[in-house]
Image (tube, rainbow, N blue to C red):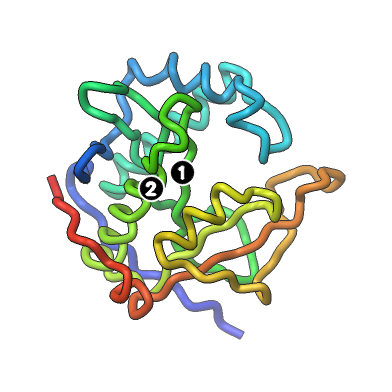
Amino acid sequence: MQVPTLMLRTFAAPVELRTPRLLLRQWKDNDSEAWATMNADPEVRRYFPSVHTRSEAQGEADRIRASITQRGWGMWAVEVPGVHAFAGFVGLNLPAYEAPWMPAVEIGWRLAPPPGHQGYATEGAAAALHFAFTHLELPQVVAMSVPTNGPSHSVMERIGMVRDASADFDHPRVPADWPLKRHILHRITAEQWRLHQAPVKKA
């Protein structure tokens, strides 16, 4: 059976999104220190197999930044103007591995502890979904998480995503013996999103 492909719109320059409190932007060189610090924090990485070394954190940041340079969008750095110069990321990504639900664009977020529990993930994710369905015109967006990641599940539900139990999968990028290898999937279609949309200003 032939696997369908996604036609992904690209932009000549990195797109920035603004919400009432946040700026979603391209990454900067001076984000590196805060990014390395947050990824060395066991609390931030509690749903991952391990914390990141500084080299691993930098490698991930470089890949994210390059993806935004290539497409104009991606896992944007989150800035809270006047409060946090760098608070983590929120955005969209095209997974580089095979899964039963592919091809699809995923939405994701990872924020440092201080900005946590202030609704930044929900606010940023809502902006990313708005961009995905109005500017990229995607048919759907997915989100994945481990079963115990209640905070992320709550964000997914608040932005209108629905659990698809039939799409649970073993994540191919984590160790085979890791207890949380099994991941669950949430989805939202363009039609479902229209019932949950909120205006977002495009910078």
| Callout 1 secondary element | strand
Report crowding for label 1: few under 14, some 14 to 19, many 20 or more residues within 10 A (C-alpha): many
Location of residue 135 with respect to 19 vertically, above or below: below
Q: Nearer the viewer, residue 97 or 183?
A: 183
Where's the C terminus, which quadrant? top left
Q: Amino acid at mark 1?
A: Trp
* Farthest-out residue, front: 118
Q: Nearer the viewer, residue 3 or 64?
A: 64
Residue 117, x across and y down, in percent: 46, 37
Report crowding for label 2: few under 14, some 14 to 19, many 20 or more residues within 10 A (C-alpha): many
- The Cα atoms of the two marked residues, 1 and 2, are separated by 7 Å
Residue 131, x across and y down, in percent: 26, 58
* Farthest-out residue, right: 177
The disc placed on residue 74 is none
Mark 1 and mark 2 in contact? Answer it, CB < 8 Å: yes
Residue drawn at the location 45% of the way across and 24% of the way down: 114
The disc placed on residue 91 is 2
Residue 110, x across and y down, in percent: 49, 38
Residue drawn at the location 39% of the way across and 37% of the way down: 118
Left or right: where 129 falls relative to 103:
left
The disc placed on residue 109 is 1
| Callout 2 secondary element | strand
Residue drawn at the location 32% of the way across and 53% of the way down: 128
Residue 78, x across and y down, in percent: 33, 34
Q: Nearer the viewer, residue 24 or 97?
A: 24
The image quadrant that residue 177 belongs to is top right
Location of residue 71 with respect to 69 vertically, above or below: below
Left or right: where 110 falls relative to 118:
right
The image quadrant that residue 1 belongs to is bottom right
Left or right: where 194 falls relative to 91:
left
Q: Amino acid at mark 2?
A: Gly
Q: Nearer the viewer, residue 55 or 86?
A: 86
